[in-house]
Image: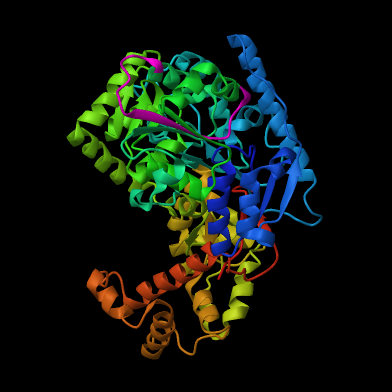
Amino acid sequence: MKLLLFATVAEGHQLILHVRAIVHEALRRGWEPHLVVPEAAVAHPSFKVLQDDFGDKLPFSTMPSPVYKYSGKFLRRLIGLFGADFKHRKAFGEGFQTLPAGYKPDLIYFLNLDHTDLSISLKGSPFGDVPFSGMMFGKMFHYAEMGIPVPLAKTDRTFYEPLFKRLLKIKSLKSMAIIDPLLIKHLEKVKWPGWEKVTFVPDIGRLQIFSRENSIRKEMGIPEDRFLIMNFGWLHPRKGIYELVDAMESSEWPENASALFVGSMRPEAKELIETDRVRKLVAEGKLFLRTGFADDEVEGKCFAACDVVWLGYRKHWGMSGVLVQACLSGKPVISLDEGLISWYTKEYGVGEIVDITQPSSICRAVQSLMSDKKLYWQYQENCLKIGKLHAPGTFERAICDMLVIAIDIPLGQLSGGGRECDPAARRLIGRRRSSVFPVPFREALMGATRSEADARSRALGGPGVPAQTFGLFPKIVELRSLMLRAPSIAAKLFEIHPEVSFWAMNGGSDLDFPKKHEFGKLQRRQLLTAEFGADLDERITALGVISSAVAWDDVYDAFAAAWTAKRIALGKAERVTPLLQVDESLDHIVNIWY
């Protein structure tokens, strides 16, 4: 599968974590990823990390780097936000047009769909009919209903909720990942059209783990007896750096407590760092600085060196990747009292909640974590439990897995015409050709009886409808209904046929006996045990699935389907015919995979 990735920024976790993880998993599955980044991102250290990791395995193209501002009063901010969104859409379209000649992606994935969801909901996809997917991070229209008060809840419901509903209806949007468990609960309740496209995926976690015994603090010039609060990432006023400095200057700031600022600085942060008040804190040993890009090793060592992670962000109401890293490292957090970070902190008991506008509130939280060892250890234990949900590999597998489902039912029927994949499959499997039942014209499915369905098909010049085929009608109709109701599920479905799968397992040779024959059962067992292990029958027996309704050949068929599903997931599967027929009523490609 050709997977085209669009990244919008180089800072933060988008390249260094999200792209890196997805590309690693895509390559493991045999997919062909291609990355499009803003022109300015190519010079960023995080992009160099990608090049060092993947080299020529990750070809890339560039798109214009949108320049935008959305600050000031509410209306100016709103206009600026929409302007930025439309500029991103235009940049994505231009990046798409400059792809290598002949390159046609099977799927486009946005690393941050928030950056262009508003314009796409209003004007449609910049990629025409090419299927796209992506991750959404920052929607808040559901917060109030889910018990999370935020200042902009009414604004979000007025502007962003209807646009989100429009986005879900876009035909070429095949799936959407979110990191907010409350949003999926909200969607399950309201059930807007297209809500099935949305999948909850735990935010990415990846961290090199170091031991404090490795003299890490000594390397960083930090005394071992200091209780260290770390502010990690892209240093910016929104990270609450001013509020943390105010608290350190307070007379209530605990003795032996210090802060560590780690990351690249925005101009506003640099302005603060260069003030006399910050120089004084550094001289007193209350503040330590590790500025500049933090690579994997630096990040891991800084999380190992600290005791607590600062999440007292200013007007930040969404999720935070730093919270995930804190949980992976088992470090309690100090969180603001609003938004999803606050909810996570309270719901899972991973740290203290503070009013960041009150230095005394911050100081009390630091003192509590320093003095109450039992409380600190409980937070630490809870962090490690939550960290398991974000363990390395979980995120990227979930993103890639949500794109593929294999099924042994005909997917797609043509109006007034036959499916080319059925005779192609019969030709492939030779003596076992009778196992591929003819799939009737779409019109035949409306027949209430076999004779009526047969007459409808023959009236259009199609084949008759055998009893075996008519027996599949209820399942075919049920599946068509599901695909019509849930286009996101339809986009992930791949049709397989067990006998075609056994033919492929057998080196492209048809099997000697039918599956009901004793020797046919033996031959299929030999093929499957070569793939799934010599103890396959013992494991099947232990599962207790064999019964009067489920015979051995049925279970072997299921394992053949699983074999093909794995090939699809790994990008190794093939189609029985290169011809691309489409059931336009479902917008689904009609073919059989093996």
In the image: residue 560, left or right of residue 103: left
Which image quadrant for residue 171?
Answer: top right
Residue 433 can be seen in this image: yes
Nearest to the observer: residue 153 or residue 120: 153
Which image quadrant for residue 418?
Answer: bottom right
User: How far from the left and from the top, in percent, is residue 570?
Assistant: 54, 65
User: How far from the left and from the top, in percent, is residue 135?
Assistant: 53, 40
Q: Residue at x 40, y 28 (%)?
A: 340
In the image: residue 441, left or right of residue 217: right
Classify 451 as above or below 505. above
Tell whether position 263 is magenta. yes
Nearest to the observer: residue 184 or residue 337: 337
Nearest to the observer: residue 388 or residue 402: 388
User: How far from the left and from the top, in percent, is residue 104?
Assistant: 73, 54
Q: Report the span colored magenta.
A: 249-267
Q: Report the colour scheme.
A: rainbow
| Quadrant showing the N terminus | bottom right
Classify 15 as above or below 114. below
In the image: residue 253, left or right of residue 284: left
Residue 200 can be seen in this image: no
Nearest to the observer: residue 132 or residue 330: 330
